[in-house]
Amino acid sequence: MSKLGATLKNKRETLGLDMDKVTEETRISADIIEVLEKGEYKSMPSYNHAKNFVKNYASYLKLDLDKVKELFDQECVKEDFYREVKYVTAPVTKEKTVAPSGIRFLIPIIILAVVIFTGYKVYTAMQKGKEMGSVDSAVVKEETKSAIDKELDTPVDEQEVKEVIETIKKEAVSPEPEKVQKKEAVKVPEKSPETVEVTDEEALSAFLPDVKEEPKAAAKTAVVNFSDVCWVHIVIDGKKEMDFIAEKGNQRDVVFHYNFIMDIGNAAVVSVSYGNRTIAGLGAYKEPVKGLKFTVNDNDRLSYTSVK
């Protein structure tokens, strides 16, 4: 048996105090007092809950707090304190739906048709670019050949030959700078702009829907009110945890995005407010309740369910 629990119980009986009187004067429920006197501290929600209830009860019985703390540290170590929370949820059954055979075959055919059509368009554009380039080269070659043939077929005048001979003789006596005959430049048609190559991925992206990331839910604030003493444990969005003992008239703001789950030791003294709605009557007086899950629906209305 717990030495500290026996000390608490013996002191209460020595003072002639029954359970109802202690409960009325300390605002500690009879269940918790029995837990303290049996020394079953690890059954409480957390180490802080056990430590504070032992301290408050020992102060009420006017025991030496230093000795009580020494006994408590021997029987309840923080590192060995485990709080086991079990959430029971109903299994979710999913019905398998089979799409009609016509639709199952139609979807791959549509996708394949889109890919083939896109590839055909890209191939046609590339072929047109090659044909235009070959036509340009053929035109340039034909015009150049015509110009050369024209020069070769032109008859030579005897007078021009004589003038050329005379000019050569004069240059031999007193050379002059060479005269460069400028030939008329052959016009080359401008090249068509380069064809832009389109990959299959870029072509298919035009037919695929844009993927949008789900925005994070907006932060919401609920106010928890306490009309009497109560121990509380809250888990926010499955991550952040709060452990405390509330006094009469206390309020706590709970900021959450999706939900919060609350365990309370005195259900009748707790109410939760959000917007213009207040939820109360979560249980009987001095009755502990666990697994109250609070959420806000699409109409911005607060509601709760029990997940235990």
Image (spheres, rainbow, N blue to C red):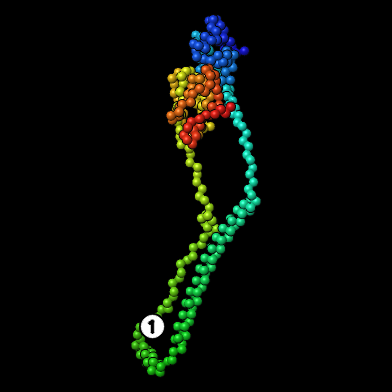
Q: Is residue 28 above or below residue 14?
A: below
Instruction: Residue 51: tell me if it is visible.
Output: no
Q: Is residue 225 above or below residue 7?
A: below
Instruction: Determine the image quadrant of residue 251.
Output: top left
As drawn, is 2 to the left or to the right of 237? Answer: right
Of residues 57 and 223, the one nearer the viewer is 223
Q: Position of residue 83 (x, y in %)?
A: 57, 24
Give the quarter of the figure containing the N terminus: top right
Instruction: Residue 3: tell me if it is visible.
Output: yes
Q: The disc labelled 1 sits on which kind of residue?
A: Gln
Q: Position of residue 64 (x, y in %)?
A: 50, 10
Give the quarter of the figure containing the C terminus: top right
Residue at x-position 41% and y-position 93%: 157
Instruction: Determine the image quadrant of residue 221.
Output: top left
Q: Position of residue 252 (x, y in %)?
A: 45, 25
The residue that label 1 is drawn on is: 181
Q: Position of residue 235 (x, y in %)?
A: 52, 29
Of residues 17 and 155, the one nearer the viewer is 17
Instruction: Determine the image quadrant of residue 110.
Output: bottom right
- Mark 1 crowdedness (10 Å alpha carbons): few <14, some 14-19, many ≥20: few
